[in-house]
Amino acid sequence: MKTSASSPWTSARSRFIEAGGNTTQSFGFGRIIGQVYALLYLSPRPMSLDEIAEELEVSKASVSTTVRQLEQWSAVKQVWVKGDRKDYYEAETDFKTVLRRGLLDTARKKLETAGRHIQEAETALAEASSSVNGDDRKELETVLARIEEAKKFRNKIEALIGNPLIDHLL
C-alpha cells in the first residue's frame, strides 16, 4: 500500500486499511474488498478508481470489480464530482445500512438460491428412488438424509437472518 510521509496518522491509516483487508479475507471475501472499503471509509472526499488503485497499489481492473461488489452490498456508492467525467466513489459510513441493505439482503438471496437447488436435488432423487435398489438404494438414502440436513440448516439460517429482531436491532 502506498503511503506518503511517515506520520502517526498515515501509519494508523495504513494499519486500518490492512485490518479491513485482513477482516474480509478471514470471512472469505478477499483482502481487496476490505482494503477498498476501509480506504473509502477513511477518505474525507470521494475517490476515483485510478486513485484507489494507485493508493492500494493494485490494478484498476481489480478495483473496478471490487467496487461493483461493494456497490451490490450498499457499502459504497458512486457520486458525481463537478467538472470531472471519471467515476468517483464514497463509502457508506452507516454500518447498519451496509448490514441491512447489503450483506443481509445478499445472504437472503443466496439462501433462496440454495433452497431452490436443494428442492431440485430432492425432486431428482425422489424420481430416481423408484428405480434404485441394493447398494445404490443405501447410497441414495444416505444422500437423501444429507440433503434433508442441509435443508434444515438452510431453514435455520433463513429464520435467523429473517428474524424481525435482527431488523429491529439494525
Image (spheres, rainbow, N blue to C red):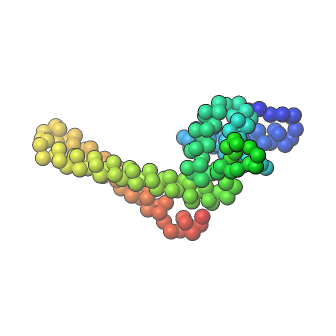
Residue 20 visible? The answer is: no
Return the x and y of residue 149 as percentages of the image width and height. Answer: 33, 51
Quadrant location of residue 142? top left
* Count of numbered circles on the image: 0
User: On the picture, is 35 further left or further right than 158?
Assistant: right
Viewer-nearest residue: 144 or 87: 87
Name the residue at 69% across, 55% down. 93
User: On the picture, is 69 further left or further right than 15?
Assistant: left
Name the residue at 26% across, 44% down. 143
Q: Quadrant of the N terminus?
A: top right
Return the x and y of residue 19 as percentages of the image width and height. Answer: 69, 42
Viewer-nearest residue: 5 or 86: 86
Return the x and y of residue 28 as percentages of the image width and height. Answer: 54, 40
Name the residue at 86% across, 41% down. 8
Quadrant location of residue 99? bottom right
Q: Is residue 32 above or below residue 93?
A: above
Viewer-nearest residue: 142 or 123: 123
Q: Quadrant of the C terminus?
A: bottom right
Residue 23 visible? The answer is: yes
Viewer-nearest residue: 167 or 58: 58
User: On the picture, is 113 further left or further right than 48?
Assistant: left
Return the x and y of residue 43 as percentages of the image width and height. Answer: 76, 47
Name the residue at 73% across, 33% down. 54
